[in-house]
Image (cartoon, grey):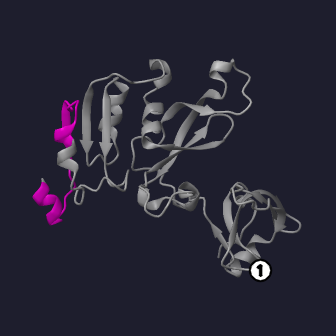
Amino acid sequence: RRCFGPEMVGRVIDVAHTEDDKKYFRVHVAEYDLRSRKHRVESYSIGDGGEQEVVAWLDLEGLRVLGRLEIVDGQDNLRRSGHALVGEEVHFLADQEGAEDDVEHRGERWRGARIVGWWPQEMLPPVAVEGHGPDSARQAIFVAEETGRGDKWQLTLNDAMLAAADVKQQGGQLAGQRQALFEVFAGSCELSLAFRRAGAASLCYDSAIDSTQDFASDSGFVGRLEESEKPWDIVHFAPPETDDPRIVMRL
């Protein structure tokens, strides 16, 4: 049986309101008191609706037993393998309020981090889809842990690929390149990442990456390829073994 203790510090949870258990407030677990066995929680985010900031000591174990608590940060379901980006050292720009740089580059700092895991688009936790409508396209998210500080950042596939390709050393951008590789059924994106590192533009297409990239049901797939102003040098197909007639017929 799971009991909540000091390992909950740093987690993000939804806790039911005392007056209405159908409404939840989202909090970040900041501290654990061994004597009282309670956790200090703080508001994870304050929306635009004038929500009251929360700072409180709570009995998380008691709330769990009553069914009034849900862990929403997805850390228990974070995949630690299955993609070429996992384990990669990356560099990326991140906004920073109050940066002491010159005015032109204020708010930008290069971050060094390592990608520790990812969520396929169908496994995104609530904290990764907050603010998105039910009909919005869902994209895989990669979690990068900052070197030295331990701060965690959520990156889209494109941002993570650019960071792993060390764009910092390539002048900060990969614009103007010829379109070298369009990888369909990209899976782990290993081939696309190799092209990026070689300084060539590549694009991954896979249902695990983007909810709109389901080859079996994407009726506009061929049309977009034909209408592209800059054709791809290589369109690489690596379909999985499947009996799905939709995929077999389209291939």
Relative side of 132 to 27, left or right: left
Which residues make up the magenta segment? 225-250
Relative side of 174 to 248, left or right: right
At label 1, the amino acid type is: Glu
Query: Where is residue 38 shown, x and y percent of the image?
Result: 82, 67
Residue situated in front as seen by the camera: 174 or 104 = 104
Task: State how many labels appear.
Answer: 1
Indicate yes or no whether the magenta region holds residue 230. Answer: yes
Question: Crowdedness of circle 1 by 10 Å Cα count: few (<14), some, many (20+)?
Answer: few
Residue situated in front as seen by the camera: 80 or 195 = 195
Q: Quadrant of residue 148?
A: top right
Relative side of 179 to 161, left or right: left
Figure check: 224 above or below 199: below
Indicate yes or no whether the magenta region holds residue 13. Answer: no
Identify the residue at the far right of this view: 35
Q: Quadrant of residue 201?
A: top left
Q: Which quadrant does the N terminus fall into?
A: bottom right
Figure check: 247 above or below 68: above
Query: Where is residue 204 shown, x and y percent of the image?
Result: 32, 42
Query: Where is residue 58 shown, x and y percent of the image?
Result: 81, 69
Q: Residue at x 69, y 37 (%)?
A: 149
Q: Which residue is mark 1?
A: 19
Query: Where is residue 223 shown, x and y percent of the image?
Result: 18, 46
Q: Residue at x 57, y 58 (%)?
A: 130
Task: Give the secondary structure at mark 1.
Answer: loop
Figure check: 49 above or below 61: above
Q: Residue at x 25, y 38 (%)?
A: 182
Identify the residue at the far front of this view: 49
Relative side of 203 to 63, left or right: left
Q: Residue at x 22, y 36 (%)?
A: 228
